[in-house]
Image (cartoon, rainbow, N blue to C red):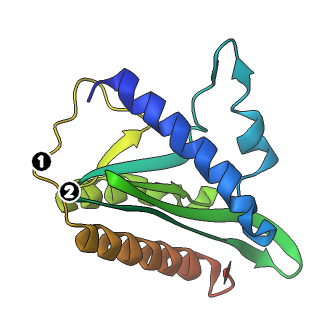
Amino acid sequence: MSQTVQEIIAIWATMFTMVIEFYDPKLAMATDQDRQAMPFKGKSFSKPPPDWRIYMARLRSNEEADWYHTGGWVQFEEDKLDDRFLFTRIHFGTVGLIVVRLPGQDQATYPGLDEDCHQLGLHRIWPSQLGMIEFGRGLTATQFLSIAWDMRQTLLDIINDVAGDTADSL
């Protein structure tokens, strides 16, 4: 997969996330700044916000499309909204995507997350990687769903550790 294709899929996954999170408006965790970072220019949208991460896996099965979206706020002082967390899993056909936005203070975990994902069979496509990405045999849908669930829980644990258990997950 070339860098251009990575970016096109990342734009789609970001727009999908920004739209489906309004399925339940209390889960709308993309910020106004995130939305403004992706204006429609010419014939396409701009690239996703730089503080988002998007991972992709090749899946062996061709099951029905499915998605899951969650988010939460991290509060460091009472009644003060500090930052937002979002997590979206998208599964359709032989493609699995995970979209993540961590609060600013937690973004230092991204490099470790990139490495862990790569070892599990997911590849970071945003920020896009130079050169080509080779996808292996692929994961089963069950493996992908298990990895996504574990990743979501790990990220919530990291946020809660930093926030002192004040993260409010939805």
Tell me if 137 is positioned left or right of 8 in this view.
Answer: left
Quadrant hosting residue 164? bottom right
Rendering coords of residue 140 (x, y %)? 20, 66
Label 2 packing within 10 angstroms: few (<14), some (14-19), many (20+): many
Depth check: 1 or 163 in front? 1
In this figure, which residue is indicated by the disc labeled 1?
136
Residue shown at 33% from the left, 58% from the top: 112
- N-terminal of the pair, mark 1 or mark 2, is 2
Q: Which mark is residue 121?
A: 2
Q: Is residue 135 above or below residue 26?
A: above
Depth check: 160 or 69 in front? 69
Tell me if 161 is positioned left or right of 125 in this view.
Answer: right
Residue that lies at the very extreme toward the left in this rendered image:
137
Rendering coords of residue 49 (x, y %)? 61, 38
For label 2, the SS is: loop
Q: Is residue 103 visible?
A: yes
Q: Quadrant of the C terminus?
A: bottom right
Name the residue type under label 2: Gly
For label 1, the SS is: loop
Rendering coords of residue 60 (x, y %)? 18, 57
Depth check: 24 or 49 in front? 24
Residue shown at 64% from the left, 78% from the top: 163
Residue that lies at the very extreme toward the top in this rendered image:
42
Label 1 packing within 10 angstroms: few (<14), some (14-19), many (20+): few
